[in-house]
Image (spheres, rainbow, N blue to C red):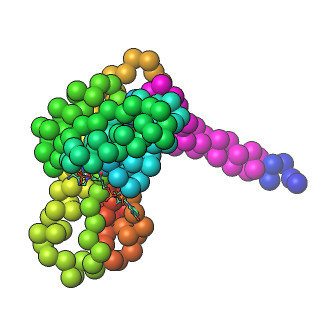
Amino acid sequence: MSGADLLILTLIILLLISLKLILRPHPTKIPIKSRHVFITGGSSGIGLALAREAAAEGARVTILARDMKKLEQAKASIQVSTGTEVDIVSADVRDFHAVKTAVESAGEIDVLICNHGTFLPYEVENMEMKGIEDIIDVNLVGSFGLVKAALVGMKKRKDRRPVSIAFMSSQSGQVNQVCLTGSSFMFIC
Ligand SMILES: NC(=O)c1ccc[n+]([C@@H]2O[C@H](COP(=O)([O-])OP(=O)(O)OC[C@H]3O[C@@H](n4cnc5c(N)ncnc54)[C@H](OP(=O)(O)O)[C@@H]3O)[C@@H](O)[C@H]2O)c1
């Protein structure tokens, strides 16, 4: 290898190292033991499974959904399987005031999981506008409301440990079928 080749190789390696340092986000492990995990749509399906998992790992868990009866059933089932009591809060993510109140009453959040979601199994051309508007209200506007409500407190955390906001998505967002599913469709459409 000539001196010029070596120089180019060194420059490339330096460039790659610089990019790794500069580019965001960095993969970060978020510890959840003894930390507060707030999960929307936590009364059933994927949200309930996540809540159970987080509780089993020692997190303080709050689950949010609309139906209080389902929330209470979810709480009881998590208590039976993990021995941990989770907090439950009823709110419709379309109601920003209710979401803000729920987030504030839950206390400081370390990990917010926007998992709530509604889905219409039709191609866009076969959807009613009302259905599309409902999905946007719940999945998109509802997620923005949650983030807006939680972000101020999450940014103010003084313990300097990493915090995280996650959005549940769906493969449906990657195909033409329904580009409007999953809380994070705004990032994949
Ligand atoms: N299941 C799948 O195969 C699949 C695949 C890919 C992605 N996903 C995505 O994963 C997420 C969870 O799916 P899932 O199948 O587990 O859902 P699910 O069992 O239908 O549960 C939906 C949860 O969201 C809550 N929710 C719905 N509308 C709400 C609203 N307006 N305000 C507050 N909470 C609301 C529901 O409770 P209430 O009705 O009581 O409010 C429930 O707790 C969704 O974002 C979905 O798009 C699901």
Displayed quadrant of residue 129: bottom left
Point 31% across, 69% down: residue: 179
Q: Nearer the viewer, residue 51 or 78?
A: 78
Q: Looking at the figure, which quarter contains the C terminus?
A: bottom left
User: 32 left or right of 117?
Assistant: right
User: 1 left or right of 187?
Assistant: right
Point 35% across, 77% down: residue: 176
Whether residue 113 can be seen here: no
Percent x, y for residue 168?
38, 53
Whether residue 141 can be seen here: yes
Percent x, y for residue 61?
39, 34
For residue 124, above or below residue 11:
below
Magenta-highlighted residues: 7-35
Percent x, y for residue 169?
39, 58
Point 29% across, 57% down: residue: 117
Check if residue 92 falls in the magenta segment: no
| Residue found at the very far top of the displayed protein | 158
Q: Looking at the figure, which quarter contains the N terminus?
A: bottom right
Q: Nearer the viewer, residue 90 or 79?
A: 79
Q: Nearer the viewer, residue 61 or 174?
A: 61
For residue 181, above or below residue 107:
below
User: 80 left or right of 156?
Assistant: right
Q: Nearer the viewer, residue 72 or 55?
A: 72
